[in-house]
Each structure stands twice: as C-alpha cells, then as structure tokens.
Image (cartoon, helix red, strand yellow):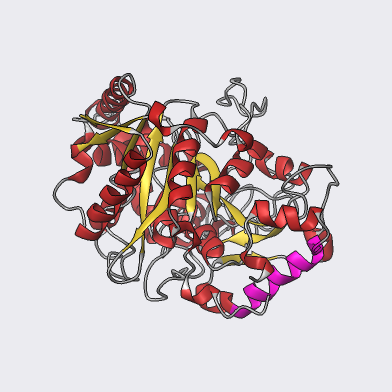
Amino acid sequence: MSLNQLTIHDAADGIANAAFSSQELLEAVHRQIARVDDTVQAYHTVLTDPAKTSVLSDKAGSLLQGIPLGVKDNICTEGVVTTCGSKMLENFVPPYNATVMTRLEEHGAVLVGKTNMDEFAMGSSTEHSAFQPTRNPWDLGRIPGGSSGGSAAAVAAHECIAALGSDTGGSIRQPAACCGVVGMKPTYGRVSRYGLIAYASSLDQIGPLTKDVTDAAIMLEAIAGHDPKDSTSATIPVPTIVKALHRDMSEIRIGIPDEYFAEGLDSDVNDGVRAALQVLISRGAKPQAVSLLTTPYGIATYYLIATAEASSNLARYDGVKYGYRSSQSQDLLEMYCQTRKEGFGRETQRRIMLGTYALSAGYYDAYYGKAQQAREMIRSDFETAFQEVDVIVTPTMPTPAFRLGEKTDDPVQMYLSDIYTISANLGGFPAISIPCAMSRDGLPIGMQIMGRWFDELTLLQVAFAFEQETDWHLKRAPISEDSNG
C-alpha cells in the first residue's frame, strides 16, 4: 500500500516505529496531488513552501504528529489565502488561525492545502465554486457532494490523509456519502467556530472527513473542546473517544424512522442502508420504529433560516474594508452594488435575496418567525425520539452522486439532496455518515447515524461496530489506484 493511502492511525504507527518518516509521508501525498488533482480538482491552494508545510510542534504522543491534512477553504489559516470559494475573497489572507487550526498545529499536523468548496458553503455539489468544479474520484462525470466536496474528494483520492470540512445543512455528511468516506458533524458548540467564515451562524459546525471511524475519533478529540473566543462554544468536557470505540451493541437501541425511507428514495440506497441495519442488528443492536412527523418541514425551515442568516452575515462584503472591490463605479452606492454583483456567484446571490426577503418588514413573522417555530418543533420531535432510542439510522442522501450539471438549473432539486441531513443542523445534535454499500453503477452509498446532544461517543461506537463487520470503508476509488506513492 502506498503511504498516501494510509489512515491516520496506521500512519502514526509507521512514523512511531520508524518504518517511514513524516517527510516521506508528506512527499507521497504531494506526488498523489501532482498525479490526480488536475483531474479531480479537490484543492484550490496546495502548499509547497516548506515553511508552510513543516510540522509546527513536536507534541509527544500525538497521533496527528506529521499527518498531512486538507482543510476546507472557509477555515482561516494564518498567512495562507482563504477564499471561501468566492471571487469576493479571492485574495484574502487571514492574519490569524481558526481555533481548529491552532489545535491541529499543536498536535503537529501538517497543512497540505485548502480544499475547494461551494461559494460561501452554499451548495450540494461543489459546482458553485467561483474557481472550478470538483469531480468525484469514483466517477469523474459526477459531483463529489457539497459544500465540502473538495475535502471529501481529497480524502477519497488519497490526496491527504484526512481533512476538515464544515456542515451547515449536511455539507460534511453529504459529500462523505458521495465519495465513500466517513464524515462527522459534531454537536453544535462541541467544536469552536472561531475563524470559520460564517454562512449561517446558528447552523454551522466544523468536523472531520476521514478514511475510517477511528480517524474521525482522532480528529474530533483534537479539535473539540471549549473555546472562549466562540460565545456558542459549549463548556461540556470532551470524553476520551479513541480508546473507547469498542462497545457491546446489545446495549444499543436503534431508531428507524419510516419518514426517511419513503417515496423518492433510490432503491439502491434503500436496499443498502437496510442491509447495513441488519449488520448492526446481527451484532445485537435492538431496532425500534420511531416517528419523526416534522420531517417534511425540514427543507423549507432550513432554507428560510439559513438564507436569512446568510443575508446578515454576508452584508459585510461591501468592498470597503477587505475583499473584492469593483472598479466599475462612479460613487459609493454604485460601488456597493457593483461589488456584490461581480463578487458573488448566482447561487450566493439567490440565497442572499431569499434571506433578505424573509427578514424584510411585513414578511418577518410570516417567514423567518414561523421557520423558527418549525425549528423548535423539529428539535422537539427528535428529543422525544431520543428518549426511546440511543441513535437514529437513516440514509445520508436520497440518491448516489448525481452527474455534473444535472441539477444546476433546478435549485429546488439541488436543495432536496440535503433532505435527510438538515434536521441534525436545525436540532444541533451530532450525526455521522459512513460508507455502507455500493450502487449498481459502482457509486458509494452512505448511512447516517444521528445521536443525542454531545453524545458523539455513542455515534462513533455504533459506526465502529458496523465497520468491524464490513469492508465498505476499505473500497478505493478508481482514480486513487496506480499511485507511485
């Protein structure tokens, strides 16, 4: 096996046992990037400057020491351009690190580059990047998911050992499902958002994309924990996770909601997830039907709240203090208008206008106010379900990865790609997607596991138990093979 194909824990063992050096590992990753990224286009920026890629800490015993990571381009990296996938921030170089970057550097991790994404994290396919579309390593004619499609594709193509993404309505889990990797959205407040360029502040959360569940646990332990720089950061202690992944599944009650296996679900996805459920049941887990009647309201609720918050957050990009400024203007008002017209792409403009309308006088109560009420109903629905079960298992996406360009002219169909993932963001609870099957076309299928607030450990234990019984996480995308790493 080439070094770039290793997991974090296997690479850490190799470095610790002097089987190879962290420099050799980094060189293998760079060779893979040089070999495939002109095709995959997972990265927007690749760091080749030794000063930027050197290990910044020699923290003894860290499993991330010397591990090459990709980081989504909406997470601030000191001295490294952070575009958020937008012309608006094409030349923005942050003067500080996001808290998650500081924590990874303290563990000795190595930043390989910044991964491509939908502009301002608004999209489900990574086709809305201002710079390039990212392609799925399993089928270059298909999308890698979004908005963290670059991170997921980089992990699947072995262009990094693991990566960070952000998840506002499924933007870690959905691309994880498309690309056949593990993607986790922690509980809202578990991981600091300081230094994450905001899309929707009450929904955004940073999390890992990895090659297996153990690596997701390693990454989560490294980045989680209270941060006084983030007022929404929780003070709840982070438990030991990596050493506690083994658990007797006979203690676990699995909720299965009929609403997530309804009309519109692809037959391959339905069969794959139901077969995966049987694996967990064979390990002793107890299945139980649960009802989530508010499921149909999720999409409308999410796209009102998220766009309203986006309208507010993106108002700062006016061409005055930083970022893109139009040169095609004669006065201040025209400069504002032209800057935003030229600097934002169509999807971002669409969401800003939707959000501005929802917040406007005379419509606030009818739209944004009602959406917040619906959000509480959805949260309550899940709270009731979690009194009866430990986790809820669903498909991650209603279909496998669709073709590039297939839904770009139909925003509603694109939005429906997130129908199974948005509830976890609206409710703030943790969720993980793991590979569980393959479609008849040879595309990965993801299973989503959702859990109680701040109970990431149980999610990871259930995911780990499934992984121990199957080999879906070991499948490799065709483009990742033939490496000279």
Magenta span covers which residues? 19-35
* Residue at 23% over, 35% down: 257
In the rendered view, does 364 fall on the left or right side of 463?
left
Let me know if residue 23 is in the magenta part: yes
Q: Is residue 478 above or below residue 287?
A: below
Q: Is residue 215 above or below residue 473?
A: above
In the rendered view, does 436 fall on the left or right side of 79?
left
* Residue at 40% over, 59% down: 145
Query: Percent x, y for residue 405?
Result: 32, 71
Query: Percent x, y for residue 458?
Result: 47, 31
User: Can residue 318 be seen by looking at this rendering?
Assistant: no
Closer to the camera in the image, 306 or 329: 306
For the view shown, which residue lies furthest in the left direction?
263
Where does the N terminus fall, quadrant-wise?
A: bottom right
The overriding secondary structure of the stretch rendered in magenta is helix
* Residue at 84% over, 60% down: 51
Closer to the camera in the image, 4 or 191: 4
